Each structure stands twice: as C-alpha cells, then as structure tokens.
Image (cartoon, rainbow, N blue to C red):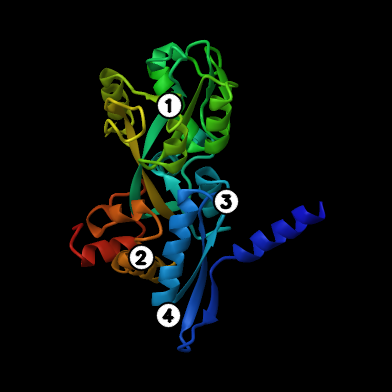
Amino acid sequence: MKKKLVSSLIVMAMSLAIVAGCSSSGEETSDIVLGTAGTAGTYYVVGAAMAATVNNNSDKLNVIAQPTKGSVENLNLANSGDIQFGMSNADGVYFAANGTNMYKESGKQNISGVMSLYMSAGQIATLKDSGIETYADLKGKKVCLGPPSTTIVEMSKSILEAYGIDPEKDITPYYLAFDEGLQKLTDGEIDATFFVAGVPTSAMMSATSTGRVTLVDVDEDIISQISEEKPYYQPYVIPAGTYTGTDKDINTFKIMTEIFTNSDVPEDVVYDFVQTALEKVDEYKDAHVVVAEISKGTAWNTSAPLHPGAAKYFKEVGVID
C-alpha cells in the first residue's frame, strides 16, 4: 500500500499541468510530460530519446518521458490534463478524437494531433505444426489478442470479426504483453499470439530463429474490406525472409504511431516541441531504427485534427496549406 501511495504521488507530481521554471539562459521554461509505454518497448525508447533531444535544444521546454501502460492510458491521462503529450497508435487517437469505439459513451476527448511518427505492423505468430494457415483456422483455438486495454486488441478483433469469428465466443481469448504471448506460444500454452510492432522486431526474430514459429497472413479481400471501413489500418506486406523460415510475403496491416496533446496546451509549447523534434531528428536517429521514418513530409498526417501549434509549424515548412 505504501509503495502504491509513493508511486501515485510521484506520477501526480510529474503530471501537474504545465509548470513554469527557468532555463540556464534565464528564460521561462515549461515542464511537460510525454506519456510513452513500458520501458522495454519502442514507445519509451523513442519517446525518451526525443525528449532528451528537445531538452538539449530548447530553452523553452523540459520534457519528461513518462513510462505508462500505453496508448489507452496516455489518451485518458491527456484528456484529463494529467499529462500534456502522449503516444498512441493511430486508431486510438482516431477513436478518442471522434468519440467512437471505447469512447462511444464518454464522447469526443479533449485531444489534438501533434505529429505522426512511424509505422508498426499487425502480426500474428503461431507454431509451424499448429495447422493454422489462415485466420479462419483460429476458430476454436487459444489466441492472445494483445495486452489488455490496448488498441492492439482492437486491431486483432477487427481482423477476426471480418473472418466471421466472434473474439469472445469462437476462440479462447488471452490478453497478454508481447513477450509473454510469445513465451506462452512457444511453451505450447496457446495456439497463436497477435502483436503490433515495427518490422523486424527483435522478439519475433528470436522466436523464429528456433525454426518453430511462423507468421500467418491476412487474405487480400479481408485487407481491402477492413482498410476501406477503417482507414487507420492500411495494407502492408512483410517481405519474405524478414524472419527466419518466413519464405513468402506476409499480407497484413500497418498503423502509424502518433503523438497527441491535450487541446488546452498553449500553442507556443506545441510549436516548439514539434519544431525541435523534427528539425533535430538526426540527433536521436540512433535510438531505434524506426526513427528513420520520422520526417516533416509525413508528420503532419495525424488521426486527430492538428493542434494550432503543430499546424503553425507545418504551414511554415510548406507541407500543409
């Protein structure tokens, strides 16, 4: 109980609404919290590197990359004003901005787009001797749909439903973290595990190196159907040979990772964050391979309407009107 109280106090202290301070040059600074995810994941690695770069180059901002449970928690914390910025897959941002899916009852959330970052791909792994060759074969199986309370589960359920499979009735659903799902798969406790990650991802490379694990692709007609209904999911092909033993192209979906903000964050704060994060991207490119995808030309395309501070920057550099 004591540990929980201390932890809660730390989070509350770090997530206070923008606090004014002073930089080494004597200028007023703004302390802001960027919600990421677990410290072992790509969100935290990229978010922490970006925060450090902004801090090293801006006299106006002090960014704290805060570990969280991921997209949904970040969206909820930003909406309530407990953090100022957050990272999420594009579908979560879309749901929150439009008051759909998990936000159908609570309505549109108080968030705006900041910048689009990099793409991740939906991937489902199974054992080569499982007899599972398509998603249709998952009926009656034990399937990990992703970590609980995440937008990853929304993607896996969307695919299953397109195949006519009820995720709550036609399979035995599990809700596990990425590494835990792969471990239970290789231990034979479940039949398949779904995850969303960059390509290639190290955990999957390790799993396929044994020669026992493979990927299942999505039928092209299902891809067309889902991408038309849900534009935040776009067709993607994982090239043959990306993972050991994967000797054919794997058809699936990609989704962008984005940064969003509470809509009430001041324009100059968002402007300075976007400007520094994009113009100094070379300074954190070695943090993770996905940073190579971050660019001015694509960063404007967010799933929530752009915050005025972000829009101001993208207009200045000529990528939007």
Q: Which residue is mark 4?
A: 59
In three-dimensional space, the C-alpha distance between marks 4 and 3, rounded to whole angstroms, equals 26 Å
The foreground one among 277 and 30 is: 277
Query: Mark 4 or mark 1: which comes first in sequence?
Result: 4
Q: Eyeballing the image, is 159 above or below 82?
A: above
Q: CA distance from mark 1 to mark 2?
A: 40 Å
Q: Secondary structure under badge 4?
A: loop
- Mark 2 lies on residue: 277
Quarter location, residue 249: top left
Q: CA distance from mark 2 to mark 4?
A: 14 Å
Query: On the rendered image, what quadrant is the C terminus found in?
Result: bottom left
Name which residue lies at 35% across and 52% down: 289
Nearer mark to the viewer, of 1 and 2: 1
At label 3, the amino acid type is Thr
Q: Amino acid at mark 4?
A: Asp
In depth, the one of 168 and 202 nearer the eye is 202
C-alpha separation, residue under disc 4 versus residue under disc 1:
51 Å
Amino acid carrying label 2: it is Ala
Q: Name the one closer to the observer, 216 or 208.
A: 208
**Residue 202 on image: x %, y %:** 44, 42
Would residue 76 be visible to someone looking at this image? yes
Contact, mark 2 vs mark 4 (Cβ under 8 Å): no
**Given the image, on which type of amino acid does mark 1 rest?**
Gly
Label 4: how many residues lie within 10 Å, few (<14), some (14-19) or many (20+)? some
Q: Name the secondary structure under disc 1.
A: loop
* Vertical relation: 250 (above or below) 161: below
**In percent of the image, x 60 and y 21: which residue is there?**
189
Residue located farthest toward the right when viewing the structure as drawn: 1
Rendered view: 48 above or below 141: below
* Residue linked to disc 3: 68
